[in-house]
Image: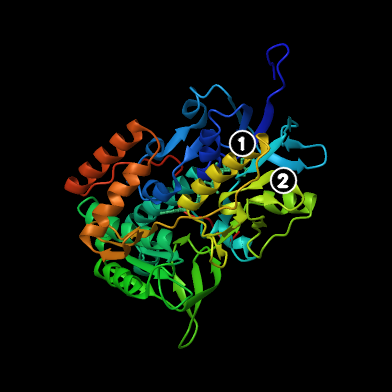
Amino acid sequence: MAHPAGSAPRAQVVIIGCGFGGLEATKALCDAPVDITLVDRTNHHLFQPLLYQVATAGLSAPAIAAPVRHLFRKQANVTSLLAEVASIDPVQRVVHTTDDGTLPYDHLIVAAGATHSYFGRDEWARFAPGLKTLDDAFEIRRRVLLAFESAEKERDPQRRADWLTFVVIGGGPTGVEMAGTLAEIARQTLPGEFRRIDPAQARILLLEGSPRVLQAMPEDLSEKAARQLRKLGVEVRTGSRVTSIDAHGLDVTPAEGAPYRLASRCVIWAAGVAASPLGRRLAEATGAQVDRAGRVTVEPDLSLPGHPEISVVGDLAAARSHVPGKEPAPVPGVSPAAKQMGRAAATNIVRRLRGEPTEPFRYRDYGNLATIGRNAGVVDLTTPFGRVKFSGYPAWLFWLFAHVYFLIGFRNRIVVLFDWASAYWSRQRYARVVTDIEPAPTDG
Ligand SMILES: Cc1cc2nc3c(=O)[nH]c(=O)nc-3n(C[C@H](O)[C@H](O)[C@H](O)COP(=O)(O)OP(=O)(O)OC[C@H]3O[C@@H](n4cnc5c(N)ncnc54)[C@H](O)[C@@H]3O)c2cc1C
């Protein structure tokens, strides 16, 4: 990188991933005397908390994604590259990309996030897609809409019922939001548009292995969420472990009673999360440890042991929050944590450049929220005055405005507000165009 004659070369910072962690780290280094190379394998920053809205045809992709290059057009110290990182050489201090690119660094922030995990049963991925990227959302939307189309064409009542049985596996926020919205599509959006089937007769099942949905929430809010889901017509089955999935359905072992089979042609996976594979490769190269989910164990200041020039942030980091006078506590894999870690890693780079000691990471937890279809939700907030919990319509409104507020870009906020307002009054979901009409995978 060019620098004025006589001046010291500027430190080279490479940031891998422009999700929540990488985006915040890059922004936080805006005025720092560094040159940043921001590398991501997609050309957009994705607002994952609203991805289920694309998967359920409520929003179109550009409403929740923003081009990385556009986001940093005014930040002169950022070069944005579209490339997939293959490996990191901590000895030469170089990042290698799959297109044979090499990116030398003085400081490296790794923010490559997470992916879904099928707990060692990767063959299930074909039959039960997970939700992590825009492509995943398009695939789920395609399968959901084409299941109704196939049911309309099917003459055999049993096979028609199979097409109209939708199963969501995993009762975390994504599973709850998906199941609630699927019920809404079946009961409120599609009726009146089909002639041979009644979409309102569709079954939506939410399977959760543990005893309750929304485990991260207090027990009373979990119960309220389950009640709100049932009111929408979702069959909530907790304590239900999935033991196999194929093209025609899945096998379930309940906590009590005999194992059973569920016939379904549309299964959605919202159950497991594992760190990006880049984490293990980085750990092998640096001697760092990974936990069971493949997250890299970091020092209190988010750097790697023996490598103060490498920081890992966001979903890829097994980090702890360091509050003076308290035991270090694990940091959850949520977007506010990724953002805070990104900012903390950037601040520590600046401190190192100034020759100052780095600071331990401290996570500020503002609480949890989830929405359950139209007009219902649960909110558990941590405020300076204590914990505030509420549910139902006020929680749904709070969820709505919080998500619009945190969306990237003024245009996206307006588009999302407009689309939601129009969907609210019309009960329609407009992003329903599909181009590939092969409805579901076969066993072959
Ligand atoms: C469907 C869904 C719903 C969610 N809902 C919520 C919610 O309601 N509230 C909440 O707080 N959190 C939610 N989360 C979690 C939240 O999105 C994550 O905690 C957050 O995105 C983590 O940020 P990150 O920067 O670590 O990773 P990410 O945001 O996942 O970003 C990682 C980036 O790295 C890039 N990348 C990965 N590997 C490579 C590579 N090898 N080379 C180059 N680039 C690479 C990816 O393309 C991506 O842009 C949700 C997640 C999902 C999937």
Q: Nearer the viewer, residue 163 or 45?
A: 45
Residue 176, position as x, y percentages in the image = 38, 63
Q: Quick check: can you spot residue 90? A: yes
Q: Which mark is residue 308?
A: 2
Q: Quick check: can you spot residue 432? A: no
What's the amino acid at mark 1?
Answer: Val
Residue 92 found in image quarter: top right
Some atom of ligand 1 lies within 8 Å of the CB belonging to the residue at label 2: no
Report, in whole angstroms, how far the alpha carbon at label 1 lies from the one at label 2: 13 Å
Q: Which of 398 and 107 is in front in this view?
A: 107
Q: Please state if 72 lies on the left or on the right of 189 as rendered.
A: right
Dot 1 and dot 2 residues touching (CB under 8 Å):
no
Q: Which residue lies furthest to the bottom in this view?
A: 257
Q: In which quarter of the image is the N terminus?
A: top right
SS at mark 2 in the image? strand
Q: In this view, does 351 lie above or below 375?
A: above
Q: Quadrant of the C terminus?
A: bottom right
Residue 265 found in image quarter: bottom left
SS at mark 1 in the image? helix
Q: Where does label 1 land, which residue?
A: 350
